[in-house]
Amino acid sequence: MKTITNLLLLVVCVTTFTFADDKPVAKKPDYSKASFYIRAIVPEGKKSPRSLETAIVTFAGENGLTVDLVAAIHVGDKAYYEKLNDIFKQYDIVLYELVAEEGHPVDKESFTNRKEKNVLGSFQEGMAEMLGLEHQLHHVDYAAKNFVHADLSPEEFFKRFSERGDMMQMLMRAILLALQKNGGDSAKKEMYNQGRFLGAMLARDPSLPLKRTLASMMYDQMEDGSWVINGDGSSIITDRNAACLKVLKKTIKDGKKKIAIFYGGAHLSEFAKSLEKDFKLKYVESKWVVAWDLN
């Protein structure tokens, strides 16, 4: 059961978040944590989240240049993706993630064909159906004129995945993490979470309690999941980020001023550090969009 729930969490969004209120950031944010980009809101008096939210984090530089990091979650409410489509219209360029050949169409038909050959895509689609959510590739308007592909091709990705030995590294980190957390309070919390998950599965209509339970469990597990995936660098995060930043440099050189990077939340902490260090941009503010309405 533990392996299944951990896998569910990683597939929903390769990221993490924290329980937080809506107060503005008062000090320099900690870019090293993916929890800065996705959060769950638990109102006072409630035990479970009532919304899952993703961040739009703005960095600004000289001559009016702004780069927004727009956190993506791969399954969410239809209204969430419609809101993002409206937001994306304000940008000169939106750099988006997708391991695909350059010029590959991104629409519902191509996603349907893609998922039939892709285990992860099929699993995400099944997750969306079980939770009463939608997959982002069904609703985000990737055909918009300001959308630009900024990711690796499948050939490049799998070459780097193999060269880095990512599969073995992730396995070793997962084993190490399990050994570190075996017993004590971690074991008690894990048993509690498993009980909540099982209870949600047995509900008459499991979609809402499952979403609330998954949102709560992510707080405990997804920071660790991000470390298992990336560690000290990986093809999944580091190499794909480098491909995106290469496109970003060209975009800035071409004179674009208002730019968005639309990537999964686990990628954004590295992006933030690069924007600050390499592009000399400064953090301005964070805004939030509801991805899962859990009421």
Image (cartoon, helix red, strand yellow):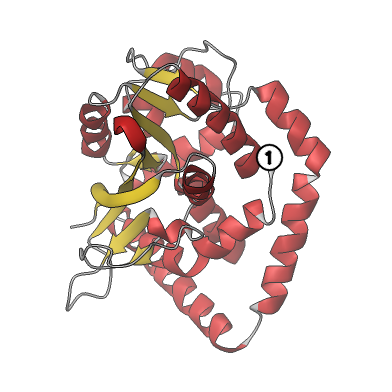
- Count of numbered labels shown in the rendering: 1
- Taking the image as shown, residue 20 lies to the left or right of residue 156, namely left
- Tell me which corner region of the image, top left, top right, bottom left or bottom right, holds residue 243: top right
Residue 204 in view (yes/no): no
Q: Nearer the viewer, residue 279 or 127?
A: 279
Residue at point 34%, 59% (across, down): 39
Please determine whether, in this image, residue 30 is positioned above or below residue 57.
below
Check disc 1 and give the amino acid type.
Ser
Percent coordinates x, y for residue 154 in the rendering: 66, 24
Question: Residue 252 or 120: which is nearer the viewer?
Answer: 252
Residue located 45% across and 35% down the image: 125
Residue 177 percent location from the top left of the image:
68, 70
Indicate the position of residue 106 as horizontal and vertical percent values. 44, 18
Coordinates of residue 155 in the picture (x, y in percent): 71, 22
Q: Which residue is under mark 1?
A: 235
Question: For the view shown, which residue lies furthest in the bottom direction?
Answer: 184
Q: Residue at x 37, y 65 (%)?
A: 18
| 77 sits to left or right of 251 | left
- The quadrant of the picture occupied by the C terminus is bottom left
Figure quadrant of the N terminus: bottom right
Instruction: Give the farthest residue toward the front.
Output: 63
Q: Mark 1 Cα within 10 Å, few/some/many (few <14, many 20+)? A: many
Q: Residue at horizontal 37%, vertical 26%?
A: 94
Q: Is residue 182 visible?
A: yes
Which element carries disc 1, helix, strand or loop? helix
Position above or below: 148 against 37 = above
- Depth check: give the residue in front, 27 or 289: 27
